Amino acid sequence: MSPGYARPLYLLPFDHRHSYVTGLFELEPPLTPEQHRKIAESKQVIYEGFRQALETGLPTSRAGILVDEEFGAAILRDATERGYVTALATEKSGTEELELEYGTAFAQHLEAFKPTFAKVLVRYNPEDDAARNRRQRVVLAQLSAYCRAAGQLFMVELLVPATKAERNRVQADQAAYDSRLRPGLVLQAMRAFQDAGIEPDVWKVEGLDRREDCARVVQTARREGRRDVGCIVLGRGADEKKVAGWLETAASVPGFIGFAVGRTTFWEAVADHEAKRATGQAAASRIAQRYRAWAEIFERAHARRASVPR
């Protein structure tokens, strides 16, 4: 079976764990049972925002959630019962080198929850440490092989952080790195994964400013007969204007099927709820509004592309 998922996919990701616990809640693991419950309840607010978005017009067929088992097990079970698209994070949070959350038992956890997608996040720069890159490819290939054999859809979230040498080349200018260096590195990483037998159905990639770079990502994702593989753009916690620009650019390219924007969607709303500045209902409504706004931006840009004479 060749890889691929080409249907529209508008994900609300809230699988954040380490950054969520330490950043938003200012807690340090290990957590007490009460702290764990508090964080799990906050994720229910995000999930309620997702459901409100569906109730107010976002098509269920295009929507989905990405969440973790640690704080979102009940959410995953409920979403599956309701027939929503789900993605389950499989990687350990807060590590520079890829480790699977449950090690060699990853398959049992996927089988228990039966998500639409098994999702894995990896930080991989082809110009970084070769031995670490090789180890990460081995882990990814094992997960990919399992998914293919089990008929499980597979999503790879590829982050390409700059090396020290690359930061020096752009005078520590993140925007310059994103524009001049990262696009080519993303393509190298994707090809390295494919050559190692890593076959995502969907690539989740950092936003790109230029349409031609998005087109090259799709071309690489679909090279050598992988014609149905989809790409989605992630938000990286950027501000609204930046995220909107990435969505508009990606939507203008066939093969980019949607987005996964998390922190920019929910962080402020959850923070206000936890600080007692907003009720759970108000926070959920804000999340729903922003999530729907991303979908509207993406669909408008997609419609403009479709209306351009060929």
Image (cartoon, rainbow, N blue to C red):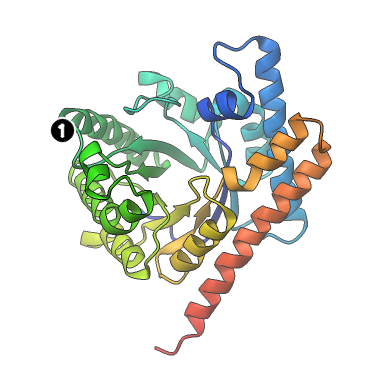
The part of the image, by quadrant, that contains residue 256 is bottom left
Q: Residue 146's spot in the image, x, y percent?
A: 34, 34
The number of numbered discs placed on residues in the rendered structure image is 1
Q: Residue 127's spot in the image, x, y percent?
A: 18, 41
Q: Residue furthest front?
A: 171
The part of the image, by quadrant, that contains residue 270 is top right
Would you say 13 lies left or right of 163 here? Answer: right
Q: Secondary structure at mark 1?
A: helix
Q: Residue furthest bottom?
A: 309
> Crowding near pointer 1: few (<14 within 10 Å), some, many (20+)?
few
Position of the C terminus by quadrant = bottom left
Between residue 182 and residue 143, name the one nearer to us.
182
Can you see residue 18?
A: yes
Between residue 296 and residue 145, name the one nearer to us.
296
Q: Residue at x 44, y 64 (%)?
A: 250
**Picture layout, residue 148 above or below residue 104:** below
Q: Residue 18's spot in the image, x, y percent?
A: 51, 25
Q: Residue at x 50, y 67 (%)?
A: 248
Would you say 45 lies left or right of 125 here? Answer: right
Q: Residue 111's spot in the image, x, y percent?
A: 48, 29
Amino acid type at image mark 1: Ala
The part of the image, by quadrant, that contains residue 295 is bottom right
Q: Residue at x 69, y 47 (%)?
A: 50
Can you see residue 201?
A: no
Between residue 174 and residue 6, name the one nearer to us.
174
Between residue 310 and residue 243, name the one nearer to us.
243
Q: Residue at x 40, y 37 (%)?
A: 121
Q: Which residue is mark 1?
A: 130
